[in-house]
Image (spheres, grey):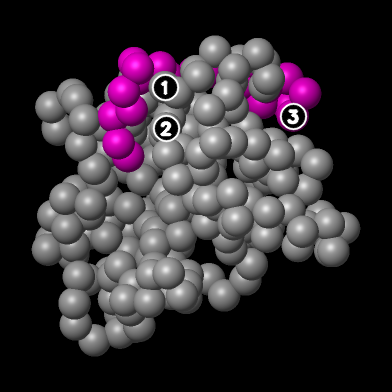
Amino acid sequence: MRHALLFAAGLGERMRPLTGRTPKPLLPAGGKPLIAWHLEKLAAAGVRYVVINTSHLAEQFPDTLGDGARWGLRIRYAYEGPQPLETGGGMRNALPLLGAEPFLAISADIWSDYDYAALPAEPAGLAHLVMVPNPAWHAGGDFALGADGRLREDGPGQRLTFGNIGVYRPQLVRDEPPGRFKLLPCFQRAMREGLLHGERYDGRWHNVGTPRQLAELDAELARRGAA
């Protein structure tokens, strides 16, 4: 994969008051902004072109990250306006910058040691999602991962949580009207057509949605030497 999208446009409401002056992906963990961990890992995986979607305090992203040269990347910014367009709308808005080939997309407010180079260059269907064991705060999971690698809303297989890491074909959202919408209905449509695949990942993965979760991640990275 040559291109990647980082979702960074959220308001970070659950992270307040920290996000009153700083976008959530720019909050530090382990001595660097959350989003910098992704940029380092993308560069290590051979990605050279990254689109970052922005909304809340958007001007801070280019001020902090620049053009990506320090990581050997080329960064482009897709501004969504003062109100974020949600995951689906944000992806749809970024398509003109991403091109026609499959691309990697990641939420900038997670942390994981998943190796992005392990993802398939092209999904078997419309998307390939990384699924993780259900955390305590989401015990019911999102989708069932079957033995055939397909994801379903219900049915046989392991019920897991979407880890907000995936490979997508532009066709997943290309025909949606521009504007604000979630990815979930697009996933559901793809699942009904047997075109959503996934894998289970049991390594380190953190959702960073609240000040407490950020503090816990920062402490873990300090204990492990940010390895």
Q: Which mark is residue 55?
A: 1
Q: Residue at x 22, y 71 (%)?
A: 152
Q: Earlier in the sequence, mark 2 or mark 3?
A: 2
Please, is residue 90 above or below residue 208 in the view?
Answer: above
Q: Nearer the viewer, mark 2 or mark 1?
A: 2
Q: Residues within 10 Å of mark 2 (few under 14, many from 20)?
A: many
| Residue segment shown in magenta | 67-87
Q: Residue at x 42, y 22 (%)?
A: 55
Q: Residue at x 22, y 59 (%)?
A: 195
Please, is residue 105 above or below residue 67 in the view?
Answer: below
The residue indicated by pointer 2 is: 11
Please, is residue 166 above or below residue 153 in the view?
Answer: above
Q: Earlier in the sequence, mark 2 or mark 1?
A: 2
**In the image, 185: left or right of 54?**
left
Marks 2/3 in contact by CB < 8 Å: the verdict is: no
* Dot 1: element: loop
* Dot 2: element: loop
Q: Nearer the viewer, residue 37 or 123?
A: 37
The residue indicated by pointer 3 is: 71
Type of residue at label 3?
Answer: Trp
Q: Position of residue 74 (x, y in %)?
A: 62, 21
Marks 2/1 in contact by CB < 8 Å: the verdict is: yes
Q: Can the viewer see residue 110? A: no
Q: Position of residue 85 (x, y in %)?
A: 28, 29
Q: Estimate the spatial distance between the alpha carbons at disc 2 and disc 1, rounded to whole Å.
A: 8 Å
Type of residue at label 2?
Answer: Leu
Q: Nearer the viewer, residue 105 or 27?
A: 27
Q: Can the viewer see residue 35? A: yes
Type of residue at label 1?
Answer: Ser
